[in-house]
Amino acid sequence: MASTKTLTGDKFDRQLFESVMKRRFFFTEPFEIYHLAPNFKGDNRGLFDYGPPGCALQANIVDAWRKHFVLEENMLELDCTVITPEPVLRTSGHVDKFADWMCKDPIKGECSPRGDYLRADHLVENVLKARLARGTRGLVKDSPKLDQVTVDEYNSILAMITPPIDNYDGDALAELIRQHDIWNPENNNQVLPPVPFNLMFKSTNGSSAAAPVYLRPETAQGQFLDFKKLLDRETQLLGETKPRATTVGQGVESGVIDNETLGYFLARVMLFLVRLGVDSSKVRFRQHLANEMAHYACDCWDPELLTSYGWVECVGCADRSAYDLTVHSKYTGASLTVKEALAEPVVVEEWQATLDKKLVGPRFKKDAKVVQSAVEALDQATLERLAAELGRNGVVAIDTPALSDGTTHVELTKELLSIAKTTRLQNTREYTPNVIEPSFGIGRIVYSVLEHVYWHRLNDAARAVLSLPLAVAPNKVLIVPLSSNPELTPIARKISARLRKMGIANLGTPLGVTVNFDTLKDGSVTLRERDSMVQVRDSEHSIVAAIRGLVEGTKTWDQVMQRMEIFGGQEDDQ
């Protein structure tokens, strides 16, 4: 367990924290009543159900994300299908490259969430760390002691393996497992050599198994395939090191951060996390090493949050350059470029390919449009090469998406295709844009925020507090009559109705409104703030207006206290 503290500096107790979360039903284990059912062998690791406050918190975080990025940045929002056909993910590189090295335990298959497979890098890491902790080469008491040479060797391996394991491929991992006699620590079974294990969930869509699909491994691919519709609408190898504090500007200027756009989004992500209630002292940005960079990225940073489980990756900010749009355009033949009007026209010399449509149609029939799109997608370097080849041989081969006969290329003769250098006046600039991808793990953010805002009243661990900011708190205001006197109830209900019309949930903290007997006399009510427990008193109208300002972020509690009377009256002892 990582050494973490509560918001007020007390030692963090995860067991106590999780009991509060489950008691207040922020989250709970799923299928709980089946745990005692006979012969139930389900594996719930990593699975949780959100209760009412958890649902509200998650919805508020998503709403805060939408306001922070979509509205404030004037972006366009998409919600794409979670099921993706295999050709899309094969083109993007995920089918071939989205994999871990896994070792099979052939004797017992219940030791891993993936059945009888264990992730090879984690297996090596866990066994070597356990041996270093025990000071022996094995798990039993009479195992031989570790000498200093072996200790140094283990630490060297762990420095290469944590974080990312891409320093070792399958063969290297197999050699580590063989050389250091590593077995499955769960049952002391010998494991087989590592094999690549695809991380995507494969399925079928409809009755045919001939067209496999995957549960998307990322949310990004849909936006690239819908790119044209958007345009139509709106043209650390040495182990763990101490984080280094720097500004985004300094990071970009020094070249540590690849470009200004990526740096800008890193800064926006930091502001967003703090807005949710994240403790800024428990945030770090870890840059991916060259050997762990995703196949589509030229730079990538992971904003990580410190929790009782250690540093947890909650966001990934990748500079994908033009990789995705380029590969999908090449495979489908669709033009995925941006055209911008130039202030002054320029003279451009370029290679231009022309198909004889009268001949291409009868020759390729229903594949004619695919062939035409493939030709239109050819870049200038390829056109120049093909022009020379066409002049020499009178025929060229063009790569295409799969045609009706299953082939992925066509041969075009000089009767069908001509390629010539032309001069034209260009009034627009055409280019394939680069993409910055900030990807958010909402579930991890929800949990980390809850840990970061958790604390308890002085010398009273039972009085737990979650200091969630008003913007994301599941419920904003608690409205209660001071007594059960029936004359007070209608007033409380009226205030509650006014707040609900403003979209402000009023069942719970961070704010509390009290209706008492003075309300019957002068219409005034009190407003209490959760963390400080300070109360102010004013008219119902002024209190409701103050609540709205606090929720919308246009007022602070200090400003409210300056404008209203600090109250220490009837409900002080409640």
Image: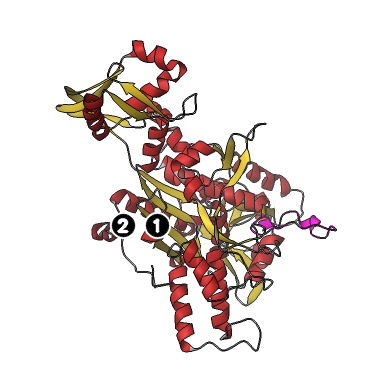
8 vs 389, nearest the viewer: 389
Residue at (71% x, 50% y) in the render: 488
Is 423 left or right of 255, judged from the image as shown? left
- Could you tell me residue 393's position as x and y percent? 25, 26
Type of amino acid under label 2 = Ile
Residue at (45% x, 34% y) in the render: 225
Q: Quadrant of residue 435?
A: top left
The span from disc 1 to disc 2 (Cα, nearest Å) is 9 Å
Residue at (50% x, 55% y) in the render: 276
- Could you tell me residue 129's position as x and y percent? 54, 77
191 vs 263, nearest the viewer: 191
Give the SS element for disc 1.
strand
Kindly check if marks 1 and 2 are in contact, taking CB atoms under 8 A apart as contact.
Answer: yes
Does the magenta stretch mainly form a helix, a strand or a loop? loop
Work out whether residue 542 can be spotted: no
Q: Residue furthest front?
A: 393
Residue matched to label 2: 257
Q: Residue furthest left?
A: 347
Q: Quadrant of residue 398?
A: top left
Range of magenta residues = 25-48
Which mark, by number, is residue 301? 1
